[in-house]
Image: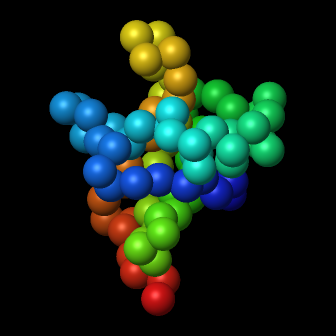
Amino acid sequence: MHRMYFDLNEVDEDGRVNLGIPGAVRDIELIGTELRDGLRVLLYSDEGQEMEAALQYDDAYKHWMAQPIPETLRDTE
């Protein structure tokens, strides 16, 4: 499962995580052409949290968003 950086402060009104931030963009660039709507990824944060999410490309934002799967949230530290 691909890993992508996330920040819980970067959540839109629909509860999706904004992946247009520098750490996430770096991870997205490393993955490249494998990205697609619905792809399950593992989000990780600087605060030692991880959770699974499904990718969604947002035409309005012109970048990837991630729909978290809340029951997968866990602390890694």
- Residue that sits furthest to the bottom in the current view: 77
Q: Quadrant of the N terminus?
A: bottom right
Rendered image quadrant of residue 39:
top right
Please state the horizontal and vertical placement of residue 71, each as a whole percent of the image.
Answer: 31, 65
Relative to residue 20, is residue 11 drawn left or right?
left
Relative to residue 53, is residue 4 drawn left or right?
right
Q: How many marks?
A: 0
- Residue that sits furthest to the left in the current view: 13
Q: Residue at x 79, y 34 (%)?
A: 32
Please state the horizontal and vertical placement of residue 70, each as a whole percent of the image.
Answer: 30, 59
Please state the horizontal and vertical placement of residue 9, each as a whole percent of the image.
Answer: 29, 51
Q: Residue at x 77, y 42 (%)?
A: 31
Compared with 61, 25 (above or below) is: below
Residue 5: in sight, yes or no?
yes
Q: Residue at x 47, y 11 (%)?
A: 59
Compared with 42, 56 (above or below) is: above
| Colour mapping | rainbow
Residue 67: in sight, yes or no?
no
Rendered image quadrant of residue 22:
top right
- Residue that sits furthest to the front in the current view: 22
Please state the horizontal and vertical placement of residue 23, each as a whole percent of the image.
Answer: 59, 50
| Front in this rendered view, residue 57 or 39 | 57
Compared with 51, 65 (above or below) is: above
Q: Residue at x 51, y 33 (%)?
A: 20
Relative to residue 44, is residue 11 drawn left or right?
left
